[in-house]
Image (cartoon, rainbow, N blue to C red):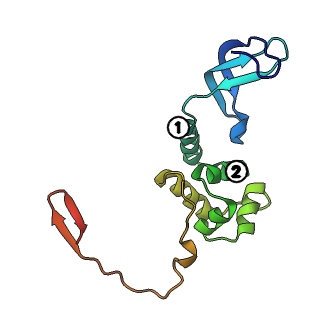
Amino acid sequence: MKCPTCRHEMKSTREAFRYEAVGLPGVVLADVEVRRCPNCGETSVSIPRIEDLHRVIAWDVIQKPERLTPEEVRFLRKYLGFSSADFAAHLGVAPETASRWETGAQAMGVTADRLLRLMVATREPVKDYALQLPRVATLDPKPTRLRLRAGPSGWAAA
């Protein structure tokens, strides 16, 4: 492969690479292909299956016993695919509060921390930003009526 900067041939090695682009300190990818230009020093890294990598990072983050750091909150928000406003709406807080969590100006409470972890554990990252949250839980409570039927493949709405 030619260097995109100076067009010299790049040298390829397999090595550990500090993955800073994810926004979390201490993430190191073992045995990835790293290309370097011996002429100008340009570096290129090949990271296969990046969506899967981010899923594994998110899963490891939510399994730690300590509270989430501001960097981890920001990473998890981005992993879920939420804008700052959507993230705040999903957690039921003001956008300013969510922003303070990500900057470290305010610690995320235990309940919000657990809710964020649960969202990561149970949801696929958002691909469509069409949210209906502004309409949710704004009306007086009303019992839900369901009609269900047992079929050969299990229960289904009738």
Residue at the spot x=28%, y=77% of the render? 146
**How would you rate the neighbour count of disc 2 (Cα within 10 Å): few for under 14, some for 14-19, many for 20 or more?**
some
Q: Nearer the viewer, residue 58 or 14?
A: 14
Q: Which numbered marker is on residue 72? A: none
Provide residue 69's location: percent of width, then percent of height.
Answer: 70, 50
Q: Is residue 134 left or right of residue 151?
A: right
At label 1, the amino acid type is Asp
Which residue is at the far left? 152
Under circle 2, the secondary element is loop
Q: Which of 92 and 124 is in front in this view?
A: 124
Which residue is at the far right? 40
Image quarter in which the N terminus is found: top right
Provide residue 18's location: percent of width, then percent of height.
Answer: 71, 29
Residue at the spot x=54%, y=46% of the render? 63
Which residue is at the far bottom? 140
Is residue 107 positioned above or below 5 on the image? Answer: below
Provide residue 53's location: percent of width, then percent of height.
Answer: 56, 36
The residues tagged by marks 1 and 2 sit, at their Cα atoms, a distance apart of 22 Å
The residue under label 2 is: 69
Q: Nearer the viewer, residue 149 or 25?
A: 149
The image quarter in which residue 31 lies: top right
At label 2, the amino acid type is Thr
Provide residue 13's location: percent of width, then percent of height.
Answer: 67, 13
Q: In this view, does 30 lie to the left or right of 151?
A: right
The residue under label 1 is: 52
The image quarter in which residue 144 lies: bottom left
Which numbered disc, 1 or 2, marks the residue closer to the eye? 1
Residue at the spot x=66%, y=48% of the render? 75
Under circle 1, the secondary element is helix
